[in-house]
Amino acid sequence: MAKRATIKDVAEAAGVGVATVSRVLSGGSASAAARERVLAAAAQLDYRPSALGRNLRQRRTGGMGLLVPDLTDTFYGQLAEGVLACARSVGEPVVLGSTGGDPEQEADLIGMLLEQSVDRLIAVPSGDAETWAPAIRAGMIVIFADRIPGQASADDTRPSAVGDLMALDGLPPAPPARPLDVPAVVADDRAGIRTAVRYLRGLGHKRIAFLGGPGHEGRAHAFRAAVGAPVDEELIVFGTGSRDSAYAAASGLFQSRPDLSAVVAGGNVLGEAAVLAARELDLRVPKDVSLVMYDDVPWAELCSPPLTVIAQPGRDMGYRAAELVLRAGTRRARSVVLPTELIIRGSCGPRR
Amino acid sequence: MAKRATIKDVAEAAGVGVATVSRVLSGGSASAAARERVLAAAAQLDYRPSALGRNLRQRRTGGMGLLVPDLTDTFYGQLAEGVLACARSVGEPVVLGSTGGDPEQEADLIGMLLEQSVDRLIAVPSGDAETWAPAIRAGMIVIFADRIPGQASADDTRPSAVGDLMALDGLPPAPPARPLDVPAVVADDRAGIRTAVRYLRGLGHKRIAFLGGPGHEGRAHAFRAAVGAPVDEELIVFGTGSRDSAYAAASGLFQSRPDLSAVVAGGNVLGEAAVLAARELDLRVPKDVSLVMYDDVPWAELCSPPLTVIAQPGRDMGYRAAELVLRAGTRRARSVVLPTELIIRGSCGPRR
DNA sequence: CACTCGCGTGGATACGTTTTCAAGCATCTC
DNA sequence: GAGATGCTTGAAAACGTATCCACGCGAGTG
């Protein structure tokens, strides 16, 4: 329709140069008289500076990217809301991508963001260090949220397959330290899981299972640490991300290990699957099996019995991550660990 | 870090002009020899065309905007997933905003998108015609999803308060027809609600209530039409969007009208509130009160009893909307109405 | 053979902004 | 009073791309 007014139009209308207009609108110094005339002209023309021109000039896009595995998972919805709230408060855009938990799609989306010159990114990572190398190399400011990639065990020094791939262009091989030095905003999984396991132990449970999904390796590790010495690896099972696969994993777990009396679900999708599978197999919660689920989602209270959960502050997590990614550059971002809380409802009971 | 290669670098490396590079990469005509050399040079330099340059040149941003009220609402999560899936398939970015159901925030976000030169937008609108006027005026291609703004009743000719505000700049007042001519992708609310009401009627229910949220005016209207002649307006109540307000509305409804025996919730947040409120008041579902909820969300099955729902295809809705908004310009987009399905589970029973 | 036609090509321009730079002017200092 | 100093100002240059246009060349046509 009516093409938008440009800075040139404003300058002309105000009888000043474009530089002055830019300065006034960007908060630079200018005489009161000039400022007033520019402001008046801008208002009268309904002028809005084009982000395109500015971005091109500054060689970067404002705002930030956000990559999550699945918006259908309420927890990621909460996280996204947090990010959006922070972005909105500073008037910056957020470009969103859903990876489906697939490293390949994640890599594609990273490529897309690179093409858009989005240089700040908050991600719930699905891929490993190799997936993230291009983003890091391009100088993107990345903040991980909710989890850290490929960190199967946080404290063992596993062989770094990453050093090799950096050895292109005659660069010296990267120092063999940790493969990715990316700040992260995560929940205190270790404490959360430990509290849950202790709680279940206190109820008399001996055979406690862990039901995880992709990206829950850290939580599984925390679970191993919490149950202590003889860990029965058969009691630790993983789904691949889809609801179907989560259900299959839960159902398989219940059927193959009838001796288990409690399960810790590593996420709300897994918890959902556990409830469904238990019901299907005529296992009563909490009579036959106790259940504690990661993530406090609104519907946890609707189940009967209401679900005992390890609550992690999804919205805060997103908000903090957004703050970090916006502040980065000014200050070197430091990782943040958010507290979890065991909310006891009705899905855990004494061992039968 | 290492600044990205530009089209100029590629041209130089390939020994051709930048115009040729642009043509090759944009699918224009070029000789086989030139094409090959350009492609080789581009690959070798790891060249990615900058969206910034392109966008500025073409005076528009690729991709699309997406505005939803609340990503914590699982239905909007599904819708967003659909949009993202379509966008990903064509490699285009999606910039997301969450309005919180607030017209003011919606207007702010529209302004932000305008500033970004995002000219395609999918929105679950919260504001009215006045909120959307700036977007339309700027020539944005807008597609509404899930609902249509301010359409309290779809078929009455209410006085248009919109004509007046267009009468700026000496323009002739807009034709008094419908205030907004924006294509939409919505579910067949009328049929969905009608089916639900008939189902409840068949179970013997006479006093059926409707529990709505912001944007559910259309569904409320469909509800009125479905229950027929003497509609008891006291049985139609609205929350304002937050979970608390939904709970308050549900609780108030149950307490003020102990004679009601069934309620239709206009969305999953409202359904959640109804379940909670009923439990708090010691009303058994479905013994004391029957409940059917709009939206089929995964946790509907987890409730006990599992919730009978009016399913609407959230993901499809998003995907279709994204297709429409991408195709628009080529073809004049036409609105789409998607079917709903009554999924009978266990939350409805015969009138006590 | 001359002329036209079509195609491949590259130089130049424009998109809207920020930022640099030098110039203009008034005030201050010695 | 002359020089220095500070502030305001506008012209111009970049940012990376797509597209217009003019040019050259080979083939086809009269």
Image (spheres, coloured by chain):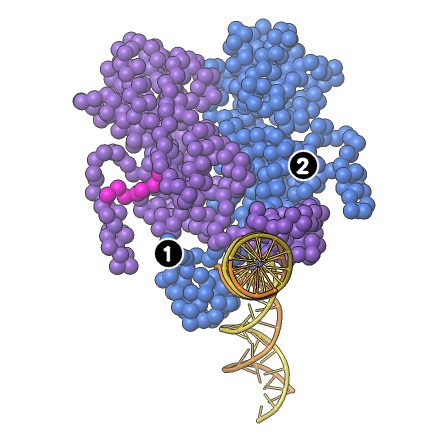
Chain colours: A purple, B blue, C yellow, D orange
Q: Give the x, y percent position of residue B82.
A: 51, 38
Residue sitting at 43 percent across and 57 percent down? Answer: B48
User: Circle 1 is placed at which residue position?
Assistant: B2
Q: In which quarter of the image is residue B178?
A: top right
Residue sitting at 67 percent across and 53 percent down? Answer: A10
Q: Do marks 1 and 2 both belong to one polypeptide chain?
A: yes
Labelled disc at residue B184: none
Give how far apart the Cα atoms at labels 1 and 2 are: 44 Å
Point out the tag, 1 or 2, that comes first from the N-terminus. Answer: 1
SS at mark 1 in the image = loop
- Magenta residues (range): A177-183
User: Circle 2 is placed at which residue position?
Assistant: B131
Query: Three-letter amino acid code at disc 2?
Result: Thr
Residue sitting at 70 percent across and 54 percent down? Answer: A13
Q: Main secondary structure of the magenta part?
A: loop
Q: Give the x, y percent position of residue A157.
A: 20, 38
Q: Sort mark 2 into few (<14), some (14-19) or many (20+) by Cα contacts within 10 Å.
A: some
